[in-house]
Image: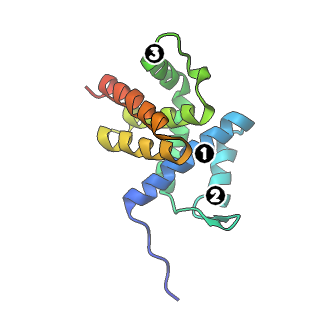
């Protein structure tokens, strides 16, 4: 029997980004401890079939880094994001999924110099499209572009 082909690195990272947003959303809603959250996603989500839907294989180390990094640097990330929002807007006014998308993108821009700014922004625009319409995807583009200019001049 043939072993299924390993997805290309870019596809595995895209799946890791989407899963990271979902994991951080779950953590925010359920107050799940980080170790338990990572274990649950490793055991029951990444690359698994759930309710007849096959989840893509994700680059697990990349997923772990994004989730753990956002968790560890949440205050710094939120301050950075807050500084990029329009006057009068607060991060806690944003949709909870949107906040996780922005946190993950901001984390990669801050901490993952191995990933180009263009790739980070493009990938999180794609993640936004999984949850939102074009208007919100453009919002992600604007905020992350502003973050990118601030942290990677």
Q: CA distance from mark 3 to mark 1?
A: 26 Å
Query: Residue 122 versus residue 103: which sits nearer the camera?
Result: 122
Q: Earlier in the sequence, mark 1 or mark 2?
A: 1
**Residue 7, how many percent across, how many down?**
43, 67
Query: Residue 48 versus residue 145: which sits nearer the camera?
Result: 145
Q: Earlier in the sequence, mark 3 or mark 2?
A: 2
Disc 2: which residue: 45
Q: Quadrant of residue 45?
A: bottom right
Rendered image: mark on residue 130: none
Q: Are marks 1 and 2 in contact (CB under 8 Å)?
A: yes
**Residue 13, how many percent across, how many down?**
43, 53
Quarter of the figure with the C terminus: top left
Q: Residue furthest left?
A: 153
**Residue 56, how many percent across, how many down?**
53, 62
Q: Is residue 83 left or right of residue 28?
A: left
Label 2 element class: loop
Q: Nearer the viewer, mark 3 or mark 2?
A: 3
Q: How many numbered circles are shown?
A: 3
Q: Is residue 60 left or right of residue 142?
A: right
Q: Is residue 22 above or below residue 4?
A: above
Disc 1: which residue: 22
Q: Residue furthest right?
A: 30
Q: CA distance from mark 3 to mark 2?
A: 36 Å
Residue located at (35% from left, 25% from top): 146
Label 1 element class: helix
Q: Quadrant of residue 114?
A: top left
Disc 3: which residue: 86
Residue located at (55% from left, 34% from top): 98
Query: Residue 20 versus residue 90: which sits nearer the camera?
Result: 90
């Amino acid at each position: 029997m043939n072993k299924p082909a390993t997805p290309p690195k870019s596809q595995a990272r895209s799946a890791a980004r989407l899963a990271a947003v979902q994991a951080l959303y779950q953590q925010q809603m359920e107050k799940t401890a980080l170790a338990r959250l990572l274990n649950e996603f490793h055991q029951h989500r990444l690359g698994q079939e759930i309710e007849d839907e096959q989840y893509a294989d994700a680059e697990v180390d990349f997923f772990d880094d994004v989730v753990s990094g956002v968790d560890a640097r949440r205050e710094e990330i939120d301050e950075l994001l807050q500084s990029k929002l329009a006057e009068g807007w607060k991060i806690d006014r944003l949709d909870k999924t949107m906040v996780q998308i922005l946190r993950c993108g901001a984390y990669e821009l801050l901490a993952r110099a191995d990933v180009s700014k263009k790739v980070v922004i493009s990938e999180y625009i794609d993640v936004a499209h999984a949850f939102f319409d074009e208007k919100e995807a453009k919002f992600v583009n604007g905020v992350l572009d502003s973050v990118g200019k601030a942290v990677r001049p």
